Image (spheres, rainbow, N blue to C red):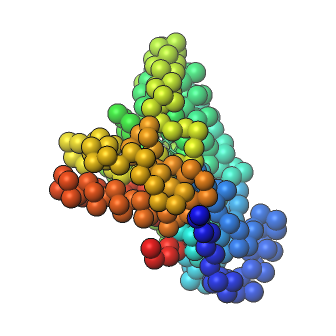
Amino acid sequence: MTQHLSPPADASLLRADDRAVLRAHFGQRVAFDEPLAPYTWWRIGGPADALVSVDNSDDAAFVLRLCFKRRLPWFVLGLGSNILVGDGGIRGLVLRLGGSFNELGVTAEDDVIVVRAGASVQMALLTAQAASRGARGIESLAGIPGSVGGALFMNAGTDREIGEFVRDVWVHTPAKPDAHPVGVQYYYRHTTLTRDAIVARVTLAFERGDVAVVRAVMQERLVRRKRTQPVGLPNAGSCFRNPPGAKAGALIESVGAKGWRCGGAEVSALHANFIVNVGNANARDVTALLARVRRAVFEARSIDLELEVHLVGEFTAH
Ligand SMILES: Cc1cc2nc3c(=O)[nH]c(=O)nc-3n(C[C@H](O)[C@H](O)[C@H](O)COP(=O)(O)OP(=O)(O)OC[C@H]3O[C@@H](n4cnc5c(N)ncnc54)[C@H](O)[C@@H]3O)c2cc1C
């Protein structure tokens, strides 16, 4: 039976006056000591000291100035499809973008389809709208269940990655709290964006193609995902990055890990690089299973797998 662990009640970093300042600015858009499990795809994670809905540039700048002044940590949460939040939760402020960060516009400029998207736009919506205008290459981003900000931060993709299509990126940073453009380098599942930056919006550009063809390819890929990924159970996509020249899923399958279980966490029988929450898993179960898989692959194949999912917040020892 999996045990749910909570941090001690006095673990919050927020003083009474911090809470008062946040309540005065955000009203009901701030929740204190809020469990994060419902905000993650894995449905796992302890509470945030404060979960704040950041709805516009003024909110973002306000939060960054407050955190800088009070030396409080913050974490930007997207749709929670690539993170494991520790059972002890996250100290400081957890920011969820919405409001004007949800704006999305798709236009045709000569032979280019230009997508302007706020960071909280869902990739599913962006890809559907871009495909309906014939954006070539968008099919590589179809079926990725995160937000635009998360996709950009992770340089998400499949055979092609989002970074390939970026024209500009606007961020808020503690040094420059108002939104400003920034240059970003893109690598396999990571970028030069620093963890203290809040991605506000991006512009993407795609070659213009035939709408029917783009839609058909995208549909085919979505169907393939449904067949090969455990979409019915909470998960966070691929847990480990592919090492050079190999597939993490195949390596994990080769050591017989499919079906291995720790508490409520299980290596998916459908896709070995996915860990599914089969019922009341906590972060300790998942980290124990990740460690077991990693050790087995290292012992059998001398390859040290690297995590793709981000571990965030406070974890308890195994
Ligand atoms: C079923 C499934 C399939 C998946 N398939 C793929 C795939 O094919 N390819 C792929 O690359 N990934 C895949 N993923 C992983 C995941 O969907 C992507 O990494 C996605 O881009 C994460 O976006 P998110 O909004 O959920 O980010 P989160 O998980 O919430 O956050 C991920 C990281 O991004 C940061 N972040 C989020 N928003 C912002 C912002 N506005 N500003 C600054 N930082 C931010 C967070 O701080 C965190 O460090 C899959 C996941 C699942 C569950």
Q: Looking at the picture, how far across and down is residue 250, in whole percent?
A: 29, 41
Query: In which image quadrant can residue 39 be found?
Result: bottom right
Q: Looking at the picture, how far across and down is residue 65, in whole percent?
A: 61, 75
Q: As displayed, is residue 24 above or below residue 143? A: below
Q: As displayed, is residue 10 above or below residue 237? A: below
Q: Which residue shows up at 35% across the image and 33% down it?
A: 159
Q: Which is nearer the eye, 56 or 287? A: 287
Q: Which is nearer the eye, 195 or 45? A: 45
Q: Which residue shows up at 61% across the image and 34% down it?
A: 125
Q: Which residue shows up at 50% across the image and 67% down it?
A: 284
Answer whether residue 113 is visible to the viewer in this image.
no
Q: Looking at the picture, how far across and down is residue 113, in whole percent?
A: 50, 27
Q: As displayed, is residue 130 above or below residue 243? A: above
Query: In which image quadrant can residue 305 be found?
Result: bottom left
Q: Looking at the picture, how far across and down is residue 102, in whole percent?
A: 66, 45
Judge from the rendering whether residue 19 lies leftward or rightward of residue 84; answer left or right.
Answer: right
Judge from the rendering whether residue 213 lies leftward or rightward of residue 28; answer left or right.
Answer: left
Q: Which residue shows up at 44% across the image and 73% down it?
A: 318
Point out the image quarter for the N terminus.
bottom right
Answer whether residue 226 is visible to the viewer in this image.
yes
Farthest-out residue, front? 1
Judge from the rendering whether residue 152 lies leftward or rightward of residue 185; answer left or right.
Answer: right
Farthest-out residue, left? 302
